[in-house]
Image: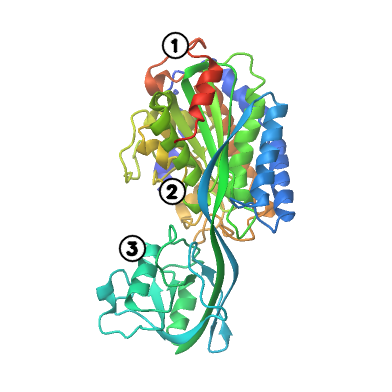
Amino acid sequence: MAATVAAAVAATTLTAPATAAPNPNNARKMAQAVKLSAVMEHLEEFQEIADDNDGNRGAGTEGHEESAEYVEETLEDAGYRTKRQPFDFTYFEVVSSSLVAEGTTVEQRPMSYTPSTPVGGVTAALVAPAVVTGCVIGDYAGVDVAGKIAVISRGSCSFGTKAAVAKQAGAAAAVIYNNADGELNGTLGAPGDYAPTTGITRADGQALLTKSSATLDIQAITEARTTFNVIAETRKGRADNVVMLGAHLDSVHDGPGINDNGSGSAAILETAVQLARVKKLNNKVRFAWWGAEELGLLGSEHYVANLQETDPAALKDIATYLNFDMVGSPNHIIGVYDADESTYPAPVPVPKGSAETEDVLTDWFDDSGQAWVDTPFSGRSDYAAFIEAGVPASGLFTGADGVKTPAEVALFGGTAGIIYDPNYHTPGDDISNINTGALDIMSDAIAAATITLAQDTSAINGKRSSGKSGKTASTDEVWEGELQEAS
């Protein structure tokens, strides 16, 4: 996510907005209306919910249910109707885990969807593949791994591939160590035929390679459950030119998820509350609090797939999608998804209109004199399903497990050489983890972009409106159709 100081400072030069904004005071007024204190009140509620529910708000848990109820009650008090869109998923939870090597306990984090070891764990010799990354069966050529614990380096392929290949090679369990500084908290992607697998730091991995044996004990639950997305939209504005905002509401099961992603959820919630007070909107604004993002972007994928199957016209009615996943990181950057690929080539085709969506956000920062940097349009969050379906998108990000550079410190302060959120995916991601300065900057930008696009998306899709819809169906019919369950 690095950018040179010169390039980033150049990005902050005041320029005329690329979008055809309505009254420029609207954006300022909306940003002023979305107060940091109100956003923090929402985060405090999420923290209290986590505290009352085993320290997390993960999908399929009571903590997520209560988080959703709070969002729904807040929206309904502001005048919205809310809908839940249910979907099935595979629930995963680690009940207990430990790794002990020759009497020394090693800090570790089991991979999501790992199978359990036998009760009492696997006690076995430690062995590394001939090729340290262990991505194909040939990487174990000449190595006797049968019944042993494979010690594998991160890199070159997915964690799921490493765990599956280790099982194929005969390993009783696998330990994957990081190839850079920092904890390793990964996922195997989905249930599969894996060796029981956990993750450790690079330093612990190097130390483990000097040991002869260890005991890995993982007891986990993997079962079918149902969770849901929460959807709400404005009553005003044309229904065939919808601006959509989204943030995932679930946390990891290891912590309360106040930055990831209580921050995005709270910011769009307060934006929705204040937007309900606006007397006239040209375009409908739809808000989504996604479920099961931490288990593989499942809620947003379900939403888009359901529209593709049951109502593709409604998918085309989405003018653009803006994603907000982690906007209060303690060692933050002010990052904008690089939809115009000016810094980072995107790994997927970028829909037309995405660059113009990015411009709405960067223009706000430029006009405010706020430094910002591009962050990769990588598909790592809930916008992935939208861009794959051809919907324009962009969004904001203050950083997760990337390492902050000296150039970014020059722009935003903080500490170089450590990750943007040192408590990413840990129990430490609580209310004390939030950088309120970053959250304030990002909340203002979210509010400003929302009202700007609610009034005018012409730079994105050429549509201008006085708020009247070209649809013949009533708003209620459109609303119900878009949430129809796929058969």
**Which residue corresponds to the image point at 47% horizontal and 88% vertical from the top-left?**
213
Q: Secondary structure at mark 3?
A: loop
At label 1, which amino acid type do we have?
Answer: Gly
At label 3, which amino acid type do we have?
Answer: Cys
**Which residue bears the numbered disc 3?**
157
Q: Quadrant of residue 355?
A: top left
Q: Secondary structure at mark 2?
A: loop
Q: Earlier in the sequence, mark 3 or mark 2?
A: 3
Q: Earlier in the sequence, mark 2 or mark 1?
A: 2
Question: Residue 246, position in %: x, y?
Answer: 53, 36
**Which residue bears the numbered disc 1?**
470
Left or right: 363 as drawn, with respect to 162? right
Closer to us: 413 or 419: 419
- Callout 2–callout 1 Cβ contact below 8 Å: no
Residue at the limit of the structure toward the front, as seen here? 487
Q: Which mark is residue 117?
A: none
Question: Residue 268, position in %: x, y?
Answer: 60, 35
Question: Residue 308, position in %: x, y?
Answer: 39, 32
Closer to us: 406 or 36: 36
Q: Quick check: 29 above or below 201?
A: above
- Which quadrant is home to the C terminus? top left
**Which residue bears the numbered disc 2?**
380
Q: Quick check: 377 above or below 95?
A: above
Q: Earlier in the sequence, mark 3 or mark 1?
A: 3
Left or right: 355 as drawn, with respect to 213? left
Q: Mark 2 against mark 1, which lies toward the viewer?
A: 1
Closer to us: 271 or 437: 271
How dense is the environment of label 1, judged by Cα within 10 Å: few (below 14), some, or many (20 and up)? few
**Which residue corresponds to the image point at 31% horizontal and 68% vertical from the top-left?**
135
Q: Quick check: 425 above or below 357?
A: below
Q: Quadrant of residue 422?
A: bottom right
Left or right: 317 as drawn, with respect to 438? left
